[in-house]
Image (cartoon, rainbow, N blue to C red):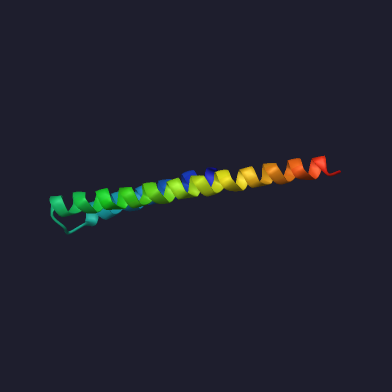
Amino acid sequence: MKAIYIILGACAAGICIGLLVAPAKGNETRKKVAETTSDLAEKLKNLIVKAKKAKEGRTADSFSNAVHR
């Protein structure tokens, strides 16, 4: 879980730096920020779903192994 926070922090820092050095107009920059934010939110949502599925799989495997002993 700590790695997710590190990755999100790095992404946020990258976006901020990009905005500071961006040669684009305000409207264009806001559009890019909105698109990037949407993309990051979708990726994070997918990552959480995968983590939950992996956790459920491990839990089910553990239960199965305990029952079959």
Image location (x, y in percent) of residue 66: 80, 41
Image location (x, y in percent) of residue 62: 74, 43
Q: Give me the residue at 36% from left, 47% from top.
A: 12
Q: Quadrant of residue 2?
A: top right
Image location (x, y in percent) of residue 42: 39, 49
Q: Is residue 15 left or right of residue 8?
A: left
The number of callouts visible is 0
Image location (x, y in percent) of residue 10: 41, 50
- Give the position of the C terminus as an image quadrant: top right
Q: Give me the residue at 37% from left, 50% from top.
A: 40
Depth check: 42 or 33 in front? 42
Q: Give me the residue at 69% from left, 43% from top.
A: 60
Depth check: 58 or 22 in front? 58
Q: Is residue 28 above or below residue 9?
A: below
- Give the position of the N terminus as an image quadrant: top right
Q: What is the residue that sits farthest to the right in this orientation? A: 69
Q: Is residue 67 left or right of residue 48?
A: right
Q: Is residue 69 left or right of residue 3?
A: right
Depth check: 41 or 13 in front? 41
Depth check: 40 or 61 in front? 61
